Image (tube, rainbow, N blue to C red):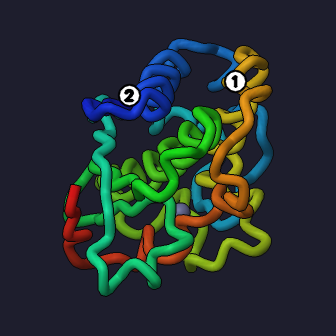
Amino acid sequence: MQAVFKGDDPGLAAAAAAITALADQNDFWDGIRAHGPFDFATIDAAEIARRLAAETHPIRVVLWKPRFSRREFYRNTVAVTNPGEPFVLHYHVAFLANSVGQKINTIVHEFIHNVDDHDGQPGEQMGHGDNDWHGKENTAPYWIGEFAQRIYEAAHPAALAQPCPAAPVQADVFADEACDDAYTGSPDPEV
Ligand SMILES: [Zn+2]
C-alpha cells in the first residue's frame, strides 16, 4: 500500500506519506484482520488485508477541478477514480481544506476500490455496492478509510486541534458516493 502526491498541497503530501508509512504498521493490518465480516464483501477481512498489503502499485493523487458545467454535479464529491485509469485519484480542489486525517480516509477508500478493480478477480469483492453511502459504515472502503484516519489522528493530536477552514465538510468521508464507482468518463481536470 503506497500513495504518491507530487503537487503543492502540504495536506495531501502529508496524507500520502502517512499512508505509505501506515503500510509498515502492524496495528493497521491487525485491526483490519480482527474485524469481522465486512458488509458487501465476498472475501473475509484477512484476505482483504492480504490483498491491500500485497498491492505494489502506488495510488497517485492529482488535483482535479471539475469543468464549469459539472461543478454543481460534483459539489459534494471529494475524489473521483475511474476504473479505466487505474490507481489515479482525482482530488477535488474544493476540498483541499480537509484535514490530513480526512484526506487519508479519502485516499485509502479509493485505494481499496482500485485494488478491488485490478486484483484479477471479476466483480466487486470488497466494495460497497451502489454509491448511496447510507448504512455503509461497515463496508471495507468506509471502515478501513475511517480506521486509517483514526490511527493517524491518534498519533498526531495536534493536527486535530487545527481548525478546518472548510467548515461544512459534513459527510465528506462519504462524499465520493456520487461517482467513484459510477464514473466512466474523463474527469476533464482543469488544474
Ligand atoms: Zn467508494
Mark 1 lies on residue:
159
Q: Residue at x 52, y 42 (%)?
A: 108
Q: Residue at x 39, y 53 (%)?
A: 91
Q: Is residue 108 above or below residue 135?
A: above
Q: Where is residue 29 shown, x and y percent of the image?
A: 63, 25
The disc placed on residue 62 is none
Whether residue 155 is visible to the viewer of this picture, yes or no, is: yes
Characterize the local packing of mark 2: few (<14), some (14-19) or many (20 or more) Cα atoms within 10 angstroms: many
Whether residue 47 is visible to the viewer of this picture, yes or no, is: no
Helix, strand or loop under label 1: helix
Q: Residue at x 76, y 57 (%)?
A: 138
Mark 2 lies on residue:
2
Rendered image quadrant of residue 137: bottom right
Rendered image quadrant of residue 185: bottom left
147 with respect to 48 (left or right): right
107 with respect to 190 (left or right): right
Helix, strand or loop under label 2: loop
Q: Is mark 2 within 8 Å of ligand 1?
A: no
Image quadrant where one finds the C terminus: bottom left
Give whichever of 106, 75 is nearer the camera. 75
Q: Where is residue 27 shown, x and y percent of the image?
A: 70, 18
Q: Where is residue 86 shown, x and y percent of the image?
A: 24, 53
Give whichever of 30, 180 is nearer the camera. 180
Q: Is residue 1 above or below residue 189?
A: above
Q: Where is residue 44 shown, x and y percent of the image?
A: 64, 48
Q: Amino acid at mark 2?
A: Gln
Give whichever of 80, 49 is nearer the camera. 80
Q: Amino acid at mark 1?
A: Ala
117 with respect to 172 (left or right): left
Characterize the local packing of mark 1: few (<14), some (14-19) or many (20 or more) Cα atoms within 10 angstroms: some
Q: Is mark 1 within 8 Å of ligand 1?
A: no
Mark nearest the camera among 2 and 1 is: 1
